[in-house]
């Protein structure tokens, strides 16, 4: 019971943080998309995709590894201090190597000359990720601090943007503000994380102990990052900055929705790892409850995003980005697969130490994405990129479930899936009726999305109560 209360509390903080993470882009992106031009936004997004690869190289698999292993020994101050210092020292070495690699990359490959200034600015985030040591906060499940800190930094970022980003010429200033959103938390963490343990550089790295699992997680993260970022990178190479800018509008919405689902999942990892480490038998019950929450939440989000993609793009970006509407519809379908796959890898396979299985699924999905991009993107540009994302995420889901079926059965949540489908029916009726009146984008989202989601919640609540009652009767 105590574990469930902690999970609920942490989930609420994490969801609050993610809601803030979603609300602020909803405020800022319409402003940016109307202030900067599509091509400059495309340059920024392409540069960010390159930096994401370097951040991955610098971080290896340290963040996930530190959370998982640190959660098991967090009650032993001596062990956690030694472990933290060793992990941090490894991270310093990997970051130095990554920065050296980035320097060679942008100065010796001519294609990146137009993006060099942007990439150099955004590379500050690489240092921020090192000094942040966010994994310490996650090990001790300090999601209250993480939430309040992130909201504070996001408020400052919005203020800076409104003050200094005034025209299309200010896209470099916008890049600095993007960097501040990661540098700010890192600076605060430098002081805050001292409450857990004093961090320093360790001479005894125990590479033989730490490096194999870290590199395994890195390989998983690399393959995942490839099929998440590769579409933007290859789209820029095949179709240019303008197409990348258009696609950024749909991926922005897609990313926001994925982060909301991830907030529910990631807070479970320390607690689940701790329970698995202690041999608790109730893990499967908790996993079933988590999966039900994910299904009942993700299904309507994907459904209403698909229905209202035109209105969402119109409000979140502008009419200059309306071409992104269909790719958003495609990505809304992908969200179903990616959310369930993320649950299986993060909440099922990872706590049980099945990193090699995750790696197989990730590599296979990344290869599918990479190969299909060569055919779809030159022909269908941003819509082709979205389509390959669907196929890659679906592959990830199928393979992950194959490996996770020993610990978790989707048959346990089929009733919840059926209830979710029933709850969407009023949304379809609302969409058909309201579209007759040709209302504005705002009213479409408010009436169809708002009332549709409210009716969905009422139907799901009623059906779940009936389902629980029948289950108790059978018991």
Image (tube, grey):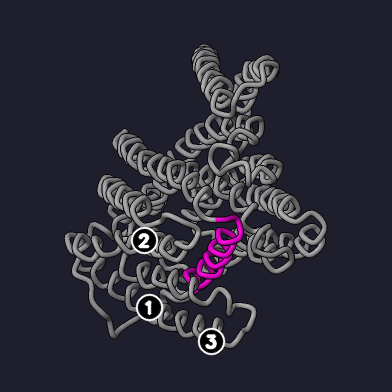
User: What residue is disc 1 on?
Assistant: 90
| Residue of label 2 | 182
Residue 278's mark? none
**Mark 3 Cα-neighbour bin, 10 Å: few <14, some 14–19, many ≥20:** few
Left/right placement of residue 163 relative to residue 52 reads left
Q: Is residue 240 left or right of residue 149?
A: right
Label 2 crowd bin: few (<14), some (14–19), many (20+), radius 10 Å: many
Residue depicted at x 42% and y 68%: 62
Q: The magenta stretch spans which residues?
A: 37-57
**Is 466 above or below relative to 51?**
above
The vertical placement of 256 against 245, above or below, is above
Circles 3 and 1: CB distance less than 8 Å?
A: no
Question: Label 3 vs label 2: CA separation?
Answer: 24 Å
Write down the residue under mark 3.
Answer: 104
Q: Say whether disc 1 or disc 2 marks the residue closer to the N-terminus.
A: 1
Q: Position of residue 280 (x, y in %)?
A: 39, 44
Residue 395 as seen in the image, left or right of residue 95 = right
Residue 46 lies in the magenta-colored region: yes
């Amino acid at each position: 019971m105590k574990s469930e209360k902690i999970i609920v509390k942490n989930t609420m903080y994490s969801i609050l943080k993610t809601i803030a993470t979603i609300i602020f882009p909803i405020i800022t992106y319409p402003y940016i998309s109307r202030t900067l031009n599509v091509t400059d936004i495309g340059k920024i997004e392409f540069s960010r995709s390159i930096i994401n690869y370097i951040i991955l190289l610098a971080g290896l698999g340290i963040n996930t590894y530190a959370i998982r292993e640190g959660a098991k020994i967090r009650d032993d101050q001596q062990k956690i201090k030694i472990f933290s210092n060793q992990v941090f020292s490894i991270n310093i070495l990997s970051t130095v190597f990554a920065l050296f690699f980035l320097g060679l990359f942008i100065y010796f490959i001519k294609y990146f000359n137009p993006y060099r200034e942007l990439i150099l600015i955004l590379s500050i985030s690489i240092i921020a990720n090192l000094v942040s040591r966010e994994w310490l906060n996650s090990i001790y499940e300090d999601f209250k601090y993480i939430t309040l800190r992130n909201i504070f930094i996001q408020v400052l970022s919005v203020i800076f943007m409104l003050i200094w980003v005034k025209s299309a010429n200010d896209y470099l200033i916008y890049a600095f503000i993007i960097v501040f959103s990661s540098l700010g938390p890192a600076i605060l963490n430098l002081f805050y994380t001292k409450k857990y343990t004093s961090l320093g550089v360790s001479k005894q790295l125990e590479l033989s102990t730490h490096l194999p699992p870290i590199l395994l997680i890195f390989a998983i993260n690399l393959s995942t990052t490839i099929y998440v970022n590769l579409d933007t990178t290859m789209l820029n190479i095949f179709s240019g900055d303008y197409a990348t800018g258009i696609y950024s509008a749909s991926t922005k919405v897609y990313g926001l929705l994925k982060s909301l689902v991830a907030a529910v999942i990631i807070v479970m990892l320390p607690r689940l790892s701790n329970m698995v480490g202690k041999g608790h038998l109730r893990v499967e019950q908790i996993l079933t409850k988590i999966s039900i929450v994910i299904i009942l939440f993700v299904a309507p989000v994907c459904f209403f995003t698909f229905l209202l993609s035109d209105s969402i793009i119109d409000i979140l970006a502008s009419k200059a980005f309306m071409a992104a509407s269909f790719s958003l519809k495609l990505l809304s379908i992908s969200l179903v697969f990616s959310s369930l796959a993320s649950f299986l890898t993060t909440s099922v396979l990872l706590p049980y130490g099945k990193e090699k299985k995750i790696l197989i699924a990730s590599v296979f999905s990344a290869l599918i994405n990479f190969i299909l991009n060569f055919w779809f993107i030159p022909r269908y540009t941003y819509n082709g990129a979205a389509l390959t994302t669907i196929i890659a995420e679906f592959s990830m889901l199928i393979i992950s479930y194959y490996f996770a079926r020993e610990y978790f059965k989707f048959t346990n949540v089929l009733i919840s899936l059926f209830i979710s489908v029933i709850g969407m029916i009023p949304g379809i009726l609302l969409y058909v009726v309201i579209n007759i009146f040709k209302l504005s984008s705002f009213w479409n989202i408010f009436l169809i999305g708002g009332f549709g989601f409210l009716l969905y919640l009422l139907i799901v609540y009623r059906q779940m109560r009936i389902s629980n009652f029948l289950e108790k009767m059978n018991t």
